[in-house]
Amino acid sequence: MTKPISSLLSYRKYEALGFYWPPAPGRFLAPGPWHLFKLQSQFVRILDVGCGINKLPGSIGIDRNTATKADVLVDVDHIPYPFRDSSFDKLQAVHVIEHVSDVIRTMEEWHRLVRPGGEVFIVTPHYTDFSSFCDPTHKWHLNTFSLRYFGDDNAGFGYYSKARFEELSVHVKLLAFWRWLGFEWAVNSSKRFRRFWEYYLCYVMRGKVIEWRLRAVK
Ligand SMILES: C[S@@+](CC[C@H](N)C(=O)[O-])C[C@H]1O[C@@H](n2cnc3c(N)ncnc32)[C@H](O)[C@@H]1O
């Protein structure tokens, strides 16, 4: 059966993010080394937290809303979730962290759920984006340094939590106009420039979405 184009696009998006299973329909037709990779990726255990109706293919989805594609109904404010320690290789939370009651406790729970070295992918609106304050269900309005407290560069506030993550990447998308002018590239080109943007420029060159890729250090 042919998949709708929107579904193909979301597959590509997830592949780009490092979530590979299952591959997009119709891809990888010719046999090659990627088949070995495909076999291996069958065993990657992924948790999609607050999956909504766009659950990542091949993952276990959790959500509290029965109208979603959740495999397990979980209120993510009720910690611990019903999974053992280190149950997952990867965890993603796309547009979810802004809804939780306690960011620190939630990050600790995500840290518990992934195996040592496992990856956590988090997406949330930048606080200067229209959607950040427009949606009355958003409890938090974050910037690109908001998760630094789980790493080494914590400005002396590493005592907020014992959970530790290595920051593999932080990427901020800007509004299309600024992206077209090349500012998105510039802001993401170095941590120093990103900090400068957060301090001085972001109320004019407004952000849209922040994406973190973190590795659990255990
Ligand atoms: C903005 S939607 C994002 C859905 C999906 N991740 C996506 O990218 O399309 C936020 C999701 O988080 C879920 N959610 C919000 N608060 C939750 C909670 N306390 N427990 C479980 N799910 C929650 C909502 O039901 C919703 O499906």
Image (cartoon, helix red, strand yellow):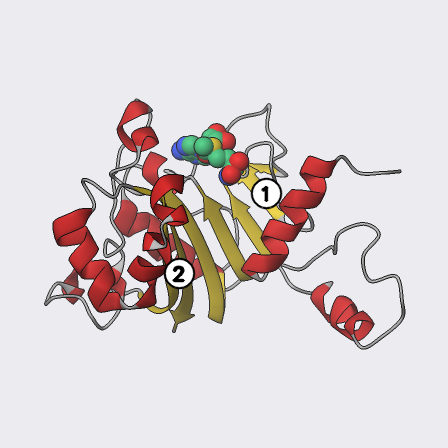
- Reply above or below: 15 against 72: below
* Label 2: element kind: helix
Residue at x-position 75% and y-position 52%: 24
Residue corresponding to mark 1 = 61
Q: Nearer the viewer, residue 83 or 196?
A: 196
| Classed neighbour count for the residue bearing mark 2: other residues with Cα under 10 Å, few (<14), some (14–19), many (≥20) | many
Amino acid type, mark 2:
His
* Residue 139 position in % (x across, y down): 27, 32
* Residue 78 position in % (x across, y down): 38, 39
| Classed neighbour count for the residue bearing mark 1: other residues with Cα under 10 Å, few (<14), some (14–19), many (≥20) | many
Q: Is residue 14 left or right of residue 130?
A: right
Give the quadrant of the N terminus: top right
Amino acid type, mark 1:
Gly
In which quarter of the view is residue 28 placed? Answer: bottom right
| Count of picture labels | 2
Residue at x-position 69% and y-position 51%: 58
Contact (Cβ within 8 Å) of mark 1 with mark 2? no
Q: Is residue 162 left or right of residue 22?
A: left
- Reply above or below: 200 against 130: below
Mark 1 vs mark 2, CA separation in Å: 17 Å
Residue corresponding to mark 2 = 111
Residue at x-position 25% and y-position 38%: 128
